[in-house]
């Protein structure tokens, strides 16, 4: 009897397992707990509070053929939480090697301590899969979280060592416009990280950021090279759809939440139908 499956065989086996039924947004509604330590509204996650995140999260689900999701966004609208929901889903339902990159090692440590660690501790299906961080060899440290069938590594984009340490299947690049242009003389941190996914047939990459400077922004460049979805909301007066931006922010959003059953639903609309595998979304506060 084979008592232990070799890592290579296990990886091959996993590639043939059926996709889980739940999408990432459904998983979040069912399982994700927002920790007291870092959330304005602690407790159960509800996608209905931020409905624009649904399609983005579901493009990250294994059922979706989309390989690369780019989210160019305004500040504080749930970009990092969206990524954490995806990480939770991976740990629970489709394990594999994952890398989360933050702008620097310091930011990475803060996200690990304030958001990821408490999310794992307070979300039962994650707590069951990741050992408590009691000892150094528990497989649960600030920059590594081991779980059955996979491993989540956390690093800063300023660390070339962190970016080339692993082969990964899932890559979460958070706040890319704050990354350095060059990491330790080894080149662009996004390219360095993406190289780690090159041998993975079913890889997924999630790139998130608030854009910094027009023309030199990394997230803007990625967005422009995409099908360029924007989140359209209906005008409360005439029902015409327009995409969310500064002048119609108030007239659109507050009213729609209130009268939702009577109005057409907001939705993402594509600008360019060129590439099914590269889905990119923009929701800005401009
Ligand atoms: N669906 C939701 N339900 C409840 N709270 C939410 C939801 N989505 C986001 N939040 C809360 O909104 C706040 C901002 O979320 P998050 O940090 O993910 O945004 P962000 O876009 O990454 O922000 P930043 O621009 O600072 O990086 C957090 O307190 C988060 O818990
Ligand atoms: Mg964030």
Image (spheres, helix red, strand yellow):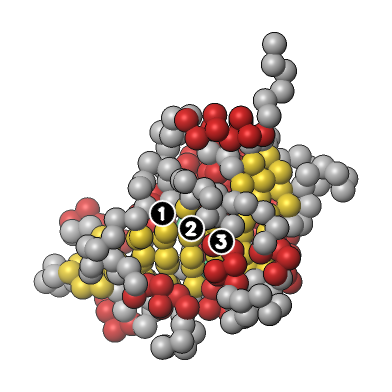
Quadrant where the C terminus sits is: bottom left
Mark earlier in primary sequence (2, 1): 1
Residue at 78 percent of width and 52 percent of height: 141
Q: Which residue was labeled with disc 1?
A: 67
Q: Which residue was labeled with disc 3?
A: 195
Q: Which residue was labeled with disc 2?
A: 205
Q: Nearer the viewer, residue 52 or 182?
A: 182
Q: Is residue 69 above or below residue 284?
A: above
- Residue positioned most to the left: 238
Mark earlier in primary sequence (1, 3): 1
Residue 32 lies left or right of residue 146; in this view the side is left
- Labels 2 & 1 near each other (Cβ < 8 A): yes
**Element at badge 2?**
strand
Residue at 85 percent of width and 44 percent of height: 137
Report the Cα–Cα distance between label 2 and label 1: 6 Å
Name the spot of residue 129 as percent of width and height, x first.
67, 36
Report the Cα–Cα distance between label 1 and label 3: 14 Å
Quadrant where the N terminus sits is: top right
- Residue positioned most to the top: 1
Q: Is residue 14 visible?
A: yes
Residue 146 lies left or right of residue 240; in this view the side is right
Q: Nearer the viewer, residue 2 or 135?
A: 2
Residue at 41 percent of width and 54 percent of height: 67
1 or 3: mark nearer the eye: 3
- Labels 3 & 2 near each other (Cβ < 8 A): no
Name the spot of residue 233 as percent of width and height, x first.
24, 67
Report the Cα–Cα distance between label 3 and label 2: 11 Å
Q: Is residue 121 above or below residue 149?
A: below
Disc 2 residue crowd, few under 14, some 14–19, many 20+, Cα 10 Å = many
Name the spot of residue 56 as percent of width and height, x first.
39, 57
């Amino acid at each position: 009897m084979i008592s232990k499956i070799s890592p290579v065989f296990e990886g091959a086996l996993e590639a043939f397992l059926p996709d889980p039924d739940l999408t990432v947004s459904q998983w979040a509604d069912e399982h994700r707990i927002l920790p007291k330590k870092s959330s304005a509204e602690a407790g159960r996650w509800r996608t209905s509070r931020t409905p624009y995140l649904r399609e983005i999260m579901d493009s990250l689900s294994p059922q979706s053929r989309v390989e690369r999701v780019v989210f160019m966004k305004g500040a504080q609208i749930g970009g990092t939480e969206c990524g954490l929901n995806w990480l939770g889903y991976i740990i629970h339902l489709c394990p594999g090697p994952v890398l989360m990159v933050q702008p620097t090692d310091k930011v990475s440590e803060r996200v690990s301590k304030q958001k990821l660690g408490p999310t794992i501790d307070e979300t039962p299906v994650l707590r069951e899969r990741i050992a408590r961080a009691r000892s150094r060899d528990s497989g649960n440290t600030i920059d590594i979280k081991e779980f059955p069938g996979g491993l989540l590594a956390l690093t800063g984009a300023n660390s070339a060592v962190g970016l080339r340490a692993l082969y990964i299947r899932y890559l979460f690049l958070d706040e890319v416009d704050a990354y350095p242009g060059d990491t330790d003389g080894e080149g662009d941190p996004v390219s360095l990280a993406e190289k780690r996914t090159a041998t993975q047939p079913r890889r997924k990459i999630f790139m998130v950021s608030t854009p910094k400077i027009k023309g030199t922004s990394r997230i803007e460049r990625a967005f422009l090279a995409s099908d360029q979805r924007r989140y359209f909301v209906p005008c409360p007066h005439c029902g015409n759809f327009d995409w969310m931006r500064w002048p119609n922010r108030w007239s659109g959003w507050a009213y729609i939440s209130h009268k939702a059953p009577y109005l057409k639903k907001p939705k993402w609309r594509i600008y360019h139908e060129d590439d099914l595998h590269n889905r990119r979304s923009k929701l800005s506060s401009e």
